[in-house]
Image: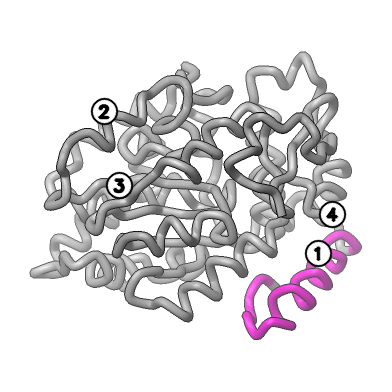
Amino acid sequence: MVNILEVVHDESLPKENWWGKNCVCQINDFWFLPKFLPSTIRVLNEFKPLPNDVILASFPKTGTTWLKSLVFSIVNRSSKESLVKHNPHDLVPTLEVQVFGTTHQSSSITTHDESHSTRLYSTHIPYQLLGNTFHSSNCRVIYITRNPKDTLVSMWHFTNKWKDADQDGPWHLEEAIEKFCSGVFPGGPYYDHVMGFRKASLEKPKNIFSITYEELMKDTKIHVKRLAEFLGCPFMNDEEVDEIVKNCSFDILSSYEVNKSGDFPSWFQVPYNSFFRQGVVGDHKNYLDAKTIERIDALTRDKFHGAGFMYGI
């Protein structure tokens, strides 16, 4: 096991190429983009959650943008105007990207008492590394996951919209498949990431809420109600729920100018419009052949079904 306190000064971390000349670095069996390694270490060493904090956790490209808009709207009931003017990732900043990254100062979240308000953050850091931080307070965590095949295809599309994609050359789907299956993937291995939070949610259901993208898509209203109850702010009537579901729908969110913008945020190398592609279930069928689908399904049976999580196929 790597000593987290020493990682920032250690140049001997395992490294692997995952796309062209781009590499990922390994800490305790998980892979991270080098750009966010120092800020990830800062989160692990410095972040002290407050009891009322809500952390939205996820593997990359599993429904994070939608979950951010929904949870922000649940906590801030009169939030439609904020969603019109701000991308969901600016409303719910990511700990290792914005909050502890180079564009923001983490001191702003620790120097004043906000113990009676709800602070919303997100993270892609696996539970296996961040679990002790969650245990240090009574904060609540919401974890969303998505079918592995759709996750892979979404990440492939997303990566090819990066600012350096033209310079590095396209990330070919065949290479993306190999890297995903081997676990050498930003945030990966995917299956370990999901199971870390899955097991924790079963052990600590009052603090960790786990949901799948497919569940949320199938009956958004029911699960928005469940999320509100988990967060301690249940709805008084169905009209409030309907309004949030409507305002956070893919069609509505993707129609706002801020989310159609080709501008790049200061905190990542993709344009804002990259966060809104299709928002559907089963898109992998348009890109993966039968052999690849069976290959990933075999992994899913082993990693998920073998552990009692009947999901992903």
Image location of residue 307, percent across then percent down:
69, 82
Q: Mark 1 is on which residue type?
A: Ile
Question: Callout 2, which amino acid?
Answer: Lys
Instruction: Please name which of the two marks, 3 or 2, marks the residue nearer to the observer.
Output: 3
Answer yes or no: do the residues labelled 4 and 3 have beta carbons within 8 Å?
A: no
Identify the magenta region.
291-312
Circles 4, 2 touching at the beta carbon (< 8 Å): no
The number of callouts visible is: 4
Residue nearest the viewer, comparing 303 with 163: 303
Q: Residue at coordinates 16% horizontally, 44% vertically from top-left? A: 114
In the figure, is residue 169 to the left or right of 211? right
Q: What amino acid is found at the position of numbered circle 3 in the picture?
A: Leu
Mark toward the start of the polypeptide (4 vs 2): 2
* Camera-nearest label, 1 or 3: 3
What is the C-alpha distance between the residues marked 1 and 4? 11 Å
SS state under label 1:
helix
**According to the image, label 2 marks what residue?**
85
Q: Which mark is residue 296?
A: 1
Q: For residue 36, what is the image quadrant?
A: top right
Are there few (<14), some (14-19), or many (20+) residues within 10 Å of tag 3? many
Which residue occupies 58% across, 22% down? 269
Does 108 sit above or below residue 47? above
Give the alpha-carbon distance from disc 4 to disc 2, as whole Å. Answer: 40 Å
Q: Do the numbered discs 2 and 1 sit on residues whose CB atoms are within 8 Å?
A: no
Give the distance between the C-alpha atoms of the residues marked 2 and 1, in whole angstroms: 39 Å
Measured in 3D between alpha carbons, the distance from the residue under mark 1 to the one under mark 3, in whole angstroms, is 33 Å
Residue placed under numbered mark 3 in the picture: 120
The mark that comes first in sequence, 1 or 3, is 3
Residue 283 horizontal side relative to residue 137, left or right: right
Instruction: Using residue 46 as the reference point, say whether residue 159 is left or right of it.
Output: right
- Per the model, the C-alpha gap separating discs 3 and 2 is 18 Å
Q: Which quarter of the picture shows residue 81?
A: top left
